[in-house]
Amino acid sequence: MLLAIDVGNTQTVIGAYRGDELVGNWRISTDSNKTGDELALNYQGFLLLKGLSFSAFDAVIISSVVPSATMALEHMTREYWDFEPLIVGINVDAGISVLIDNPGEVGPDRLVNAVAAYERYGGPGIVVDFGTATTFDAISRQGEYLGGVIAPGIEISSQALFRAAARLTRVDMRRPPTIIGKNTVWSLQSGIVFGFAGQVDRVVELMQEELGEGVTVVATGGLAEVVVDECRTVQFHDPLLTLHGLRLIYDRENKGKSQ
């Protein structure tokens, strides 16, 4: 079995694969201070919920943008499985041509998303990932990574507003009854939901103009469900896109080693 782990700045997504089948997945808060032993305890608990144990797994693949978390996961894998994890960008190539000025600048999660989106939906395509930042990544018709856009994410933008405005308090991130808010809560929700949906649609429209016709737009990430229903340009919502990409990359790497 394969354990696929995607570590973002805010959330970590974990997937357990038996062959091509995803038999369990979990989304947890990223804690860069946890040790490998603490992570092992947490992960064991999640696996037990699905009747699984560490002994069932013979491979781990990691995509991470948090160096301290990467090191902790490396320790966990060596200590509790006695083998090396596959880490995208360090000892595992994502297997996608990166056509930007400095390919090393692209986060491994964005490359993994591109691999998954191309395999599932073809190209040209755009992946909108709602995380700590909202990222937009462009994939060519041939499956090449062309570049993208990085914007402040929904949560950090909202938190900045709440910190700076003394009379505004945190609200649930959900669609208000009307676009024109009848109270402060609805007004904030309207700004968050419709404001970010509008941002997504405009950025996607401009990217589509550059990419040409036939572009497929896929949304993923932990905060996608907040606004994706209001985005007229998004065709597919694929919450587990990154896990799918990690499995594809593992399969390709494992196949290459076995030949």
Image (cartoon, rainbow, N blue to C red):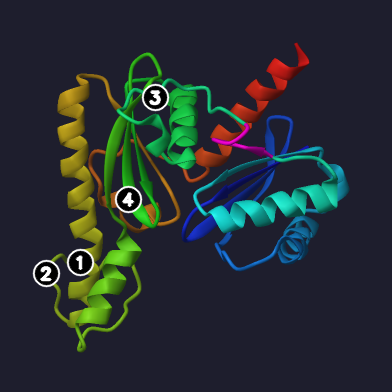
Whether residue 214 is visible to the viewer of this picture, yes or no, is yes
Q: Amino acid at mark 1?
A: Ser
Which residue is outermost to the right? 55
Q: Amino acid at mark 3?
A: Val
Q: Earlier in the sequence, mark 1 or mark 2?
A: 2
**Element under disc 1:** helix
The reply to whether dot 4 and dot 2 touch (C-beta < 8 Å) is no
Q: Amino acid at mark 2?
A: Ile
Specify few, some or many for label 3: CA neighbours under 10 Å numbering under 14, 14-19, or 20 or more: some
Mark pair 1, 2: CA separation: 7 Å
x, y percent for residue 160: 26, 72
Quarter of the picture holding the N terminus? top right
The reply to whether dot 1 and dot 2 touch (C-beta < 8 Å) is yes
Q: Which residue is mark 1?
A: 190
Q: Which residue is mark 4?
A: 134
Indicate which disc residue 180 carries.
2
Q: Given this view, does label 1 or label 2 mark the residue nearer the observer?
A: 1
x, y percent for residue 4: 65, 42
**Element under disc 3:** loop
Of 94 and 16, the residue lying toward us: 94
Mark pair 3, 2: CA separation: 43 Å
Mark pair 3, 4: CA separation: 20 Å
Q: Earlier in the sequence, mark 3 or mark 4?
A: 3
**Element under disc 2:** loop
Which residues, given as a range, are shown in magenta? Answer: 86-91
x, y percent for residue 223: 40, 57
Could you tell me what secondary structure mostly forms the magenta stretch? loop
Mark pair 4, 2: CA separation: 25 Å
